[in-house]
Each structure stands twice: as structure tokens, then as C-alpha cells.
Amino acid sequence: MPSDSDREAFTSFFQEAEPTVRHALVAVWGPDIGREAAADALAYGWEHWERIGKMDSPAGYLFRVGRSQAKRYRRRPVGIDPPDITPPRVEPSLNGALESLTERQRAAVVLLHCYEWTHAEVAAVLRISIPTVQKHAQRGLAKLRHSLEVTADV
């Protein structure tokens, strides 16, 4: 049975990390699988909080757990997690174009440009360096521009 201090520590961690883990997994796996994988990862985090709570980057670790959990689900098209408000108009072929990116390119592009995370935040959750995040984002955007036949930023 977890102690009250463990519950409080996990509750505080959960409130801060849940959006981070969910957004990162949705960026990679799409809204349905991403949300399920985030829930699974955070449940795992609670079950193993004594060990995970001591890690330098528990949210990054749970992102990895969520990636593993997501593979249990049938692969569905990826896309942007619809916000709690009326979703913005999005190019209909965007989700297909996002599917053509590698997992890291897709995560970098969606987290940086849709969720407006910083390069450091993306690097922390993906457990890669900031220059690597920049490279994945550049390559991902180039592929998207080519797929969507966009010639310049609008």
C-alpha cells in the first residue's frame, strides 16, 4: 500500500507530466492509440512509482513505456490530438503526410509546431539531444512540404 507522501508525489507528477506524455504519444501514434498508450504508461508509472519517481526524467521514461504499450494496439492513422475546443481547419491530406514521416520526425514536427513545445522539452521527452530534435524537425518539415506540395511557409 503506497504511503500518503507517495500518493502526493505521484499526484503532483501526474498533473505536470500527463499532458506531456499524452501529447508526445499522440504525436507519434495518433489520438486514439496515443491516449490509450499514455493512460497505460501512467498506470505503469503509478505501479512502479517507488523506482520511477527517483529517475532524472520520469516523463521521458514513461513516454518510452507508452511507445511499447502502443505497439499492442492496431496501428491507426496518426494525426493531431483534437483540442477540447472546436478544432482548427486542417489540410485534409495532412494526416496521410504525417504518416509518411519517421516516428521521431513526426514527434518533433507535431510537438514543436502544433503543441508549441520548445526544442529542449521535445529533447527531454524523446531522450535525444536538441540538435537531433532540430534535424528531425527540419527533415520532417521538408518531407511534409514535398508531400503537400507547399513551396513556402505561409
Image (cartoon, rainbow, N blue to C red):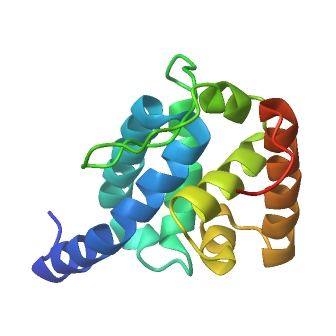
Residue found 72% across the figure and 30% down from its top: 97
* Relative vertical location of residue 76 with respect to residue 20 in this rendering, above or below: above
Q: Nearer the viewer, residue 67 or 83?
A: 83
Asked if residue 145 is positioned above or below residue 122 in the image, the reply reads above
In the displayed structure image, the side of residue 142 where residue 7 appears, left or right: left
- Counting from the top left corner in percent of width and height, residue 16 is at 33, 74
Which residue is most to the left?
4
Q: Quadrant of the N terminus?
A: bottom left
Residue 29 x/y as whole percent:
56, 35
Name the side, left or right, on which 106 lies relative to 145: left
**Extreme-top residue of the structure:** 74
Residue at 49% in and 67% down: 59
Tell me where residue 134 appears, x and y as whole percent.
82, 68
Residue 119, located in which quarter of the rendered image? bottom right
Q: Quadrant of residue 153?
A: bottom right
**Residue 10: % across, % down:** 26, 72
Left/right placement of residue 4 relative to residue 70 reads: left
| In the image, residue 83 above or below residue 125 | above
Task: Please report the residue visible at 87 percent of the width from the left and 48 percent of the height from the top.
Answer: 142
Name the residue: 46% across, 58% down: 21
